[in-house]
Image (cartoon, helix red, strand yellow):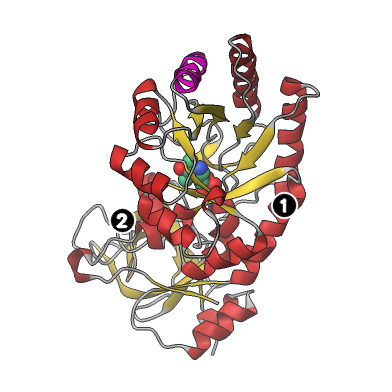
Amino acid sequence: MTSHLDRLDNDRIRGFLAAQKSDGPVLVVDSEIVRGNYAKFARALPDTRVFYAVKANPAPEILALLAELGSCFDCASVAEIDMALATGVSPDRISFGNTIKKERDVAAAHARGVRLFAVDCREEVEKIERAAPGARVFCRILADGAGAEWPLSRKFGCVPEMAADVLDHAQARGLVAYGVSFHVGSQQNNVAAWDSALASAAQIFRDCAERGIALSMVNLGGGFPTRYLKDIPAVDAYGASIFESLKAHFGNRIPETIIEPGRGMVGDAGVIEAEVVLVSKKSDDADEIRWVYLDIGKFGGLAETMDEAIRYPIRTAHDGEATTPCVLAGPTCDSADVMYEKTPYPLPISLSIGDKVLIEACGAYTTTYAAVAFNGFLPLASHVI
Ligand SMILES: *Cc1c(COP(=O)(O)O)cnc(C)c1O
């Protein structure tokens, strides 16, 4: 009989899942894929330092591997800074990249040796001045998220026209006005999406130079995609496009650059094994759509199915047999816990209660979004192999 595991290309994850019996959904991440992804970024953008976005997957084994490979870390909280420091990296390999920080958290980061902070307004600059005197700050600017499947809102960043003032404010307060950052939106499918933000960044460099402030760094953020159901451009294509834009806007004075990949570093490295809890219909009408309920849903790790933004590849033992579109839902007693309904998901008609399924490309933004025991369901179990 065919097993769902026969559908897996990844021998290591298949072997691990075959050997372990889990009662609930489980994420297995292949560290060798993470290692390969790091190498691809290093090759595609050879002069750019990598600051892995810890929030994508902070499993200690992943952080340790990336530390060993030479990665730096983009952290959004003191807890994430401590996870990064636990790998043994020195604090100069950590950036506190959240623009919204409690002043006492800035102080705690400073006490741990962190000297690089994101800001997007004068008020945040003043917190850094008080709690991390002399630190380097970079100003985040708004970037339009066109082309991204998980766009970031206007929550972070100021308009580019304001950035020189924010950086001037920092320099005048004894901080080091270090550079500019932006994020082009997560799961960004357009390799040219960095261009207009880089044009803005170059203008901010010129505006600051006129005020006697020499900026050093452009933080290109994350946005590099993972392959879900659709093909994506290779990392090399992103690297080439970004390099062209840097040359076009900065000429022969290309600044120091960093990237903060999250999804692109770990997304394709993880697979979730889950179980079909129920297959049912809402009426006996022959045309009625089937509902497939898994033991994982929006609160158990698949939060990025919100608004049906991310569509994960799902493998079953019955792949290749006839399918019908299904509503796919999670196990909790919350009506928001439905993954795909507006665009139903084609699943084999023979899929039945108790079958295991594999949800692929789940290495990023799954464990970190899993609720802690909402409705009594445990947070997503995770193994890095
Ligand atoms: C989340 C985040 C990232 C990672 O984004 P991806 O699209 O997953 O690569 C990078 N930088 C910052 C500041 C972030 O908040």
Q: Where is 176 relative to 32, above or below? A: above
Picture disc at residue 310: none
- Asked if residue 7 lies left or right of residue 291, the reply is right
Task: Provide residue 157's location: percent of width, then percent of height.
Answer: 44, 27
Disc 1 C-beta below 8 A from ligand 1: no
Residue at 43%, 22% (x, y): give it: 173
Mark 2 belongs to which amino acid? Val
Task: Provide residue 86's location: percent of width, then percent of height.
Answer: 46, 64
Q: Main secondary structure of the magenta part?
A: helix
Q: Which residue corresponds to mark 2?
A: 338
Is 168 contained in the magenta span?
Answer: yes
Mark 1 belongs to which amino acid? Ala
Tally of numbered tags: 2
Q: Which residue corresponds to mark 1?
A: 42
User: Mark 1 falls on what kind of element?
Assistant: helix
Q: Where is 46 relative to 207, above or below? A: below
Instruction: State which tag comes first along the sequence, 1 or 2.
Output: 1
Magenta residues, as a range?
A: 161-172
Residue at 37%, 51% (x, y): give it: 78
Is 286 contained in the magenta span?
Answer: no
Residue 282 visible from this viewpoint: yes
User: Mark 2 falls on what kind of element?
Assistant: strand
Residue at 77%, 26% (x, y): give it: 247
Front residue of 172/345: it is 172
